[in-house]
């Protein structure tokens, strides 16, 4: 019984201190500070999430430097980019097949362009840092935790993750980070 309790305690600590698959891994420091300013009171600063806060804070500084390099290298090209006049949007509630639809459309590379998990997860630096993405491969598990589907940086990914990172969390993803506030954040999905 003691060994079982010890194993359960270790699993709890690992699960709550895990740094993998953190959807905030691509946030820059200014955006992270805005999220902390509006929701920092919800974090258990002395609790099991402190390591995640330290991780996100540290990587947000790195992301900010990477974003500055990207801005210098690509800001003019981005401003000249013409957008397709008839974009396709996939909209739906979670667990209704939107990811499947997205992945199916992503197979048609002649008619559709999609972003990868790396592009969505690191929206401020993917244009120039993508060749070096293997340096960050350790922050992803091989499968998604909620459904055991494959996960890696080259798979198609919905842009909502990138939108959330670039908008200081103005997305329904914010409820994933601050679950206690989910009822107050429902306006983001209605």
Image (cartoon, rainbow, N blue to C red):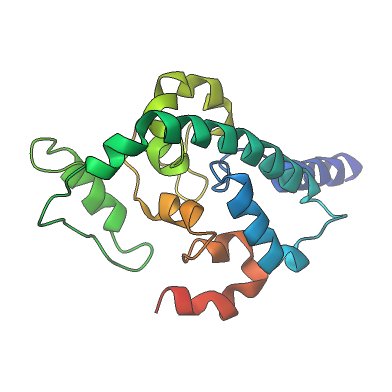
Q: Position of residue 49 (x, y in %)?
A: 76, 51
Q: Residue shown at 63%/60% (left/top)? A: 35
Q: Position of residue 58 (x, y in %)?
A: 70, 37
- Front residue of this view, candidates 113 and 181: 113
Q: Is residue 78 left or right of residue 24?
A: left
Q: Position of residue 143 (x, y in %)?
A: 47, 37
Residue 48 appears anywhere in the view: yes
Q: Is residue 15 left or right of residue 132?
A: right
Q: Residue shown at 36%/38% (left/top)? A: 75
Q: Residue shown at 15%/56% (left/top)? A: 87
Asked if residue 91 is positioned above or below residue 165 in the image, the reply reads below
Asked if residue 116 is positioned above or below residue 98 in the image, the reply reads above
Residue 152 appears anywhere in the view: no
Q: Residue shown at 45%/74% (left/top)? A: 188
- Picture quadrant where residue 39 is located: bottom right
- Front residue of this view, candidates 114 and 97: 114
Count of marks placed on residues: 0
- Picture quadrant where residue 151 is located: top left
Q: Position of residue 88 (x, y in %)?
A: 16, 57
- Front residue of this view, candidates 182 and 75: 75
Q: Quadrant of the C terminus?
A: bottom left
- Front residue of this view, candidates 104 and 72: 72
Asked if residue 73 is positioned above or below residue 94 in the image, the reply reads above
């Amino acid at each position: 019984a003691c060994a079982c309790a010890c194993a359960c305690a270790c699993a709890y600590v690992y699960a709550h201190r895990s740094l993998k698959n953190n959807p905030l891994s691509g946030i820059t420091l200014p955006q992270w500070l805005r999220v902390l300013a509006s929701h920092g009171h919800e974090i258990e600063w002395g609790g099991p999430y402190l390591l995640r806060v330290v991780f996100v804070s540290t990587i947000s500084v790195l992301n900010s430097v990477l974003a500055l390099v990207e801005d210098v290298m690509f800001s003019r090209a981005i401003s000249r980019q013409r957008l397709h006049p008839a974009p396709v949007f996939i909209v739906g509630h979670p667990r209704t097949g939107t990811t499947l639809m997205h992945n199916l459309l992503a197979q048609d590379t002649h008619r559709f362009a999609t972003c990868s998990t790396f592009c969505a997860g690191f929206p401020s630096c993917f244009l120039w840092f993508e060749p070096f993405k293997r340096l960050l491969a350790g922050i992803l598990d091989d499968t998604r935790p909620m459904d055991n589907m494959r996960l890696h940086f080259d798979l198609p990914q919905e842009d909502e993750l990138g939108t959330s990172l670039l908008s200081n969390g103005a997305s329904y993803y914010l409820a994933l980070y601050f679950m206690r506030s989910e009822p107050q954040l429902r306006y983001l999905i209605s």
